[in-house]
Image (cartoon, helix red, strand yellow):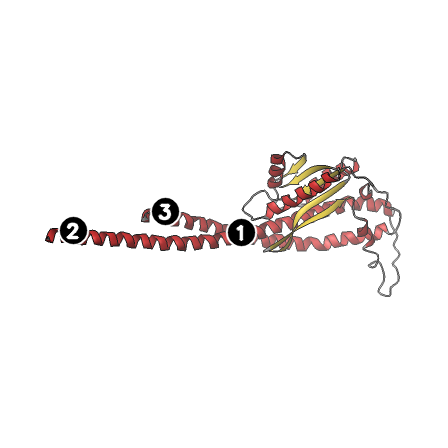
Amino acid sequence: MASTQDLKRRVRSISNTRKLTRAMELVASARLRRAQQRIEAMRPYADRMLELMAGTAQAGGALSLPLLERRENPKAIAIVPVTGDRGLAGAFNAQVLRRSFAEMRDAQTEGKEVRFFTAGKRGESSVRFRGYPLERSWTGFSDRPSYSDAQAIAHVVADAFVAGEVDRVLVVYNAFVSPLVQRVTVSELLPVPLHLLESGEESQTHEAGQPIDFFFEPEPREILARLLPVYVETELYRALLESAASEQGARMTAMRNASKAAGELIDTLTLAMNRARQAEITQEILEVVAGADALSG
């Protein structure tokens, strides 16, 4: 049985750990609020981008643009898992990597080559550890991604797609639902899904139901050729923001659970410590009584 001093040391150690987990929970909560605000701020921009793309595409032949090219027999697929740079966030990183590797196995079953472009240290280290082909990695911004970070990733994967090095690009990330729920999402980034170019058809009308006539300068095809790379950057930026919010929500929940578990363990150890102290006191009393009996005899 552990001594009273050992139990005291354990209680003190766990109390210090609980202070740390509570501090991390508060930090994650503050960062989560900021991440949610950034997601809400970029949504109108992303929606407007889709409307512009749809309206421009409907104005004339744009299906031959490189980023829209759908190849009949894709031979190589790029997977972009978006993870965090740090752990202590529950299953946040593990579930993204698990889904990414499942997509890889499905593609390999169909005879396709898979290449990884990772965002986040956890994704990079896992891919390297397993010996999978890692083309490029980006780290250092999972807590607070910027648009320039999304641009850097978008340029590399778009160049690989246009050059024919990969035929599809999939992004795997945690979509933020609530601090308790993060949904693993697989999004086809390239080629740009054609249904997006049809989504704005109903919005391009007057209230009376008559279509709106636009004059395009330069030509619609040239405008769309400029919009498509921006769309790719925007979708990646959305994924990075969703992942950042999900990471903070997962970390906040994990630290709250850790603090709760530490409190329960402290209560258990305190009870054991009190029992040990009582046993020591009882033993001392028995020794005093035995000594007194020996002297009186």
Q: Is 285 left, or right, of 25 in this rendering?
A: left
Q: Given the current orientation, which residue lies at the most extreme left position?
A: 297
Residue bearing mark 3:
9
Please report the residue visible at 47 percent of the width from the left and 55 percent of the height from the top. 260
In percent of width and height, residue 226 lies at 80, 44
Q: Is residue 216 left or right of residue 15?
A: right
**Residue tagged by mark 2?**
291
Q: Is residue 176 visible?
A: yes
- In the rendered image, the vertical position of residue 167 relative to residue 202, given as above or below: above
Question: What residue sits right under mark 1 in the picture?
Answer: 254
Q: Position of residue 220 (x, y in %)?
A: 86, 48
Marks 3 and 2: CB-CB under 8 Å?
no
Instruction: Please tell me which of labels 1 and 3 falls first in the chain.
Output: 3
Q: Amino acid at mark 3?
A: Arg
Position of residue 175 measured from the top left corner of the image (x, y, whole percent): 66, 52
Q: Tag 2's secondary structure?
A: helix
